[in-house]
Every structure is written in C-alpha cells, then in structure tokens.
Image (spheres, helix red, strand yellow):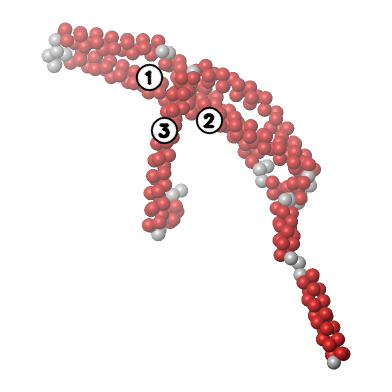
Amino acid sequence: MYMASNDISNNENNEIIGTNNINDNIPEPIQIQLVNNEQQTENQNPEYEKHNQFIIFKHEYQSMEHYNTEILDECVRNKRLLDLNYDTLFMWISYFQTSIIFFSTLSGFIQATKVVFTISDEIAFVISIVISTYTSLLLSISKYYKLDEQKEKIHNLREQYSLLQNNIKYRIDVLEQWRYHDLWLHQDPIKRFDEWCDSKKKMEKDFLQIVKTKQDLFTQFEIIMDTKQRNKYVIVNKERMYKNNVNLLSWIKKEKELESNEPNYNDLAKEYV
C-alpha cells in the first residue's frame, strides 16, 4: 500500500511537471502579436528610407514641389481675375462699337431713303444729329476711361501669366518622375541621390528668372487691378464657380442614372474617337 501510494504521487507529480513544460513552450498571444507588429513595421519601412541620402532628397523634393505648386496656384488665381476683367472690358467695348456701327448705318439709310419714305429734311437732320452726338459720346467715354488701353494691357499680362504657368507646369512635370519613392528600391542610394542632384541643378538654373518674372507680373497685376476690383471679381468668380459646379453635378447625376438604367451605356464609348 505504501509503494502504491508513492507511485500514484510520483505519477501525479510527473503529470503536473509535464503540463508546466508544455505551457512554457507555447508563446502567449500578446507576444505573438508584438512580433507580428514588429515584422509589419519593418516591412512598411523600406531599407532605403533609413539612408541619409533619401532623407535629404525627400525634404528637398517636398520643398521644390510645394514652392512650384504655390506659385502656380497664385498665377492661376490672378489670371482668372484678369480673364473676368478682360471679359467685362470686351463686353463694353463690343457694345460701344456695335451700337456705333448700327446707328451710323441707320443714319446713312435714312439719308438715302428719305425721299422714298417721305421723311422731311428737318427730321432726317435731327436723326443725323442725334446719332452723331451719340457716337461722339460713346467714343469720348471710351477714350476717357481708356478702355482700349486697359484691354490691351490686360491681354498682354494674361499672355505673360500663361507663359509663366506653362514654365511652372513643366517644372512640376519634371519633378513628377521623382514622386514615386519605390524607384529607390533595389537601387544604390548614393547613385540615386547623385542623379537627383543633377536634376535639381538643372531646375535651379531658371529659378531666379522665375522669381523675377513672378515679381514683375504681380507688380503689373496690382497696378492694373486695385483692391476694390480684385474683391469684386473674386466674388464674381465664386458665383460663377458655384453655378458651374451645380450644373456639372446635375449632368454627372444624369450620366449615372443613364449608366445604371441603360445596359449598353459602356458601349457608347466605342463610338467616340
């Protein structure tokens, strides 16, 4: 009996010890999760991001992209206001010139047909005087406000803004090839950084010229359009943008409805070149 009890106690101890060893060998869920998170973090951060060359490149690229984008946005805003001002001047000048042409032709027609339509000389003379006075008045107003000169200045300034915009867009396109950082994968960071430095030097050659052109254009812009005009056309621009967006959204909804209701809608794209 004594030996049996010892065997039972030994078996119990062995079972307990064996159970403890199995539990020790199994990693805890929290430890497994931490290991997986560390592996994911290492996978999410490529090796090239640890190099000083890439860090320098990243900051330089972001700086150049931000500056070029900022200049482009300012040019687009100013040119948009110039376009609105030009449209207003063009409308008034067209109205003046068209009305002058119309009434001058009408005066000649009355003078030529006053015998046929039995128009007295006094009435024809008064009509001719009225039309001549009206023509002189419009020409005097146009000359006083220098509408033609303002229109020509704004037109020239718009062209210069367009040239500057295209130049900046070209620089942004050149920077676009460096946007995707995955191109640094499996590449020599030093060699890749040297290529970036060469590209950056080429872009920096015309940097000062762009800044100087921007300064000149912005100075002319502030001379032509004062604060009152700028505020006026900013509001006009917002109103037009709102109407255009509402109209555009309505057409997008119509296209979505047509696409969902018409099974052959996608085939229509093949009919357009």
The mark lying in front, picked from 2 and 1, is 2
Percent across and percent down for residue 15 are 80, 80
N-term mark: 2 or 1:
2
Residue at the spot x=38%, y=19% of the render? 93
Q: Please tell me which of labels 2 and 3 falls first in the chain.
A: 2
Q: Report the residue marked by disc 3.
A: 240
Q: Secondary structure at mark 3?
A: helix
Is residue 195 at least partly visible in the picture? no
Q: Amino acid at mark 1?
A: Ile
Q: Is residue 140 above or below residue 196?
A: above
Q: Residue at x 40, y 23 (%)?
A: 88
- Residue nearest the viewer, comparing 247 with 50: 50
Under mark 3, the amino acid is: Arg
Left or right: residue 215 compared with residue 122: right
Q: Secondary structure at mark 2?
A: helix
The residue carrying pointer 2 sits among few (fewer than 14), some (14 to 19) or many (20 or more) residues within 10 Å by Cα, namely: some
Residue beneath disc 2:
76
User: In the depicted view, which residue is nearer to us: 139 or 222?
Assistant: 222
Residue at numbered disc 1: 93
Q: Is residue 264 left or right of residue 51?
A: left
Q: Where residue 105 sits in the image (x, y, percent)?
A: 26, 17
